[in-house]
Image: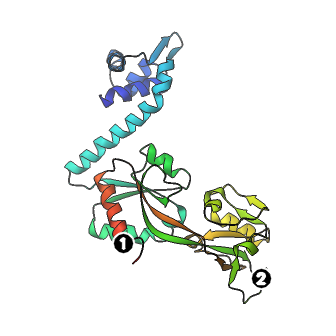
Amino acid sequence: MDDRKIHALLTTYRTGSFSKAAQELNCTQSAVTQMMNSLENELSCKLLARSHTGVRLTPAGEELLPLLLEAESVLTRLAKEARNLSEGEQATIRIGSFASISSSWLPQILQNYRAENPKVVFDLRVSTDQLPQWLGENRIDLALGDAYRCQGAQWYPLMEDPYYAVVPAHLLPPDQKVISQEAFARYPLIMSPMNALEHHMDVLSHQQLNVSSDDDSSILAMVAQGLGVTAMPWLSLGRLPDNLRVLELNPVPHRVLGVALPKSPTKAAASFAEFLKKQYPYPKK
């Protein structure tokens, strides 16, 4: 399928007319019409409806629009990567990552990988719950997260990241270093659905304040103000306010972090994943 036809269709849909699309594409109106007719013949369905008010998508066009947008993105990237390879450049690796990973060990890993592959280009996107969608829609080449978020992909564990209790500094005796999950559950719990504590801890407080945010600093600020306690993985605790304390939980809950690949990964993504597995063999011997 010719990517020019898809681009012409989407331009016509966006501008609302063949004439405006032709002007933007720097071609004749008849050329745009011919490309539309050819694409509709290939797909065996009508995509555009013409009227005196302009051009709109047919019901079939509306159904196929997400796939057409995805196809344009994939074909554009295919042409770009092929051009990079023909010019001796290495393909771009698009990474989706938890914020806690991207702010802790990932920068050093990227630096180490680039030392061996100086022409590599990284495109980093940070999120939590969007990782599986990005991976499924081919917006990223691999994801760095936990098994819970990366279901349905090829997932390889890299490391364990333990959860710790975070409490106001004055809440417990200063010599206390450990708190049981049962005792911890007696305090109001401030948590984000993104932290998925219900998948990692055995006991949770019935008094919960849910904060729908990827920003852990917001939760820590609430704990610092005395609104409750929270539990966070170690990689999220790099910048802790002075008026907070971290205690070990007993038993120790943890998440397993790893790298997820689509069913048909790019060569560059597969190479980077192998590099990660060598850097972080799991389980450690």
Instruction: Say which label, 1 or 2, has the lower sequence index.
Output: 2
Can you say whether 152 is above or below 172 in the image? Answer: above
Residue projecting furthest to the bottom: 175
* Residue displayed at 34% across by 50% down: 265
Res 177 quadrant in image: bottom right
Mark 1 and mark 2: span between their CA atoms? 38 Å
* Residue displayed at 76% across by 65% down: 205
Can you say whether 233 is above or below 93 in the image? Answer: below
Question: What number is the disc on residue 188?
Answer: none
Q: Position of residue 32 (x, y in %)?
A: 35, 19
Tell me the kind of residue under disc 2. Leu
On the rendered image, what quadrant is the C terminus found in? bottom left
Q: Within 10 Å of the Cα at label 2, are there few (<14), some (14-19), or many (20+) other Cα atoms? A: few
Instruction: Tell me the SS state at disc 1.
Output: helix
Give the camera-side residue of 51 and 245. Answer: 245
Q: Position of residue 81 (x, y in %)?
A: 29, 47
Q: Tell me whether circle 1 and circle 2 mark residues in contact (CB < 8 Å).
A: no
Can you say whether 17 is above or below 167 in the image? Answer: above
Q: Position of residue 194 (x, y in %)?
A: 61, 57
* Residue displayed at 28% across by 65% down: 118
Q: Within 10 Å of the Cα at label 1, are there few (<14), some (14-19), or many (20+) other Cα atoms? A: few
Instruction: Tell me the SS state at disc 2.
Output: loop
Residue, disc 1: 279
Tell me the kind of residue under disc 1. Gln
Residue, disc 2: 172
Residue projecting furthest to the top: 52
On the rendered image, what quadrant is the N terminus found in? top left
Residue 15 in view, yes or no: no
Res 36 quadrant in image: top left
Residue 239 in view, yes or no: yes
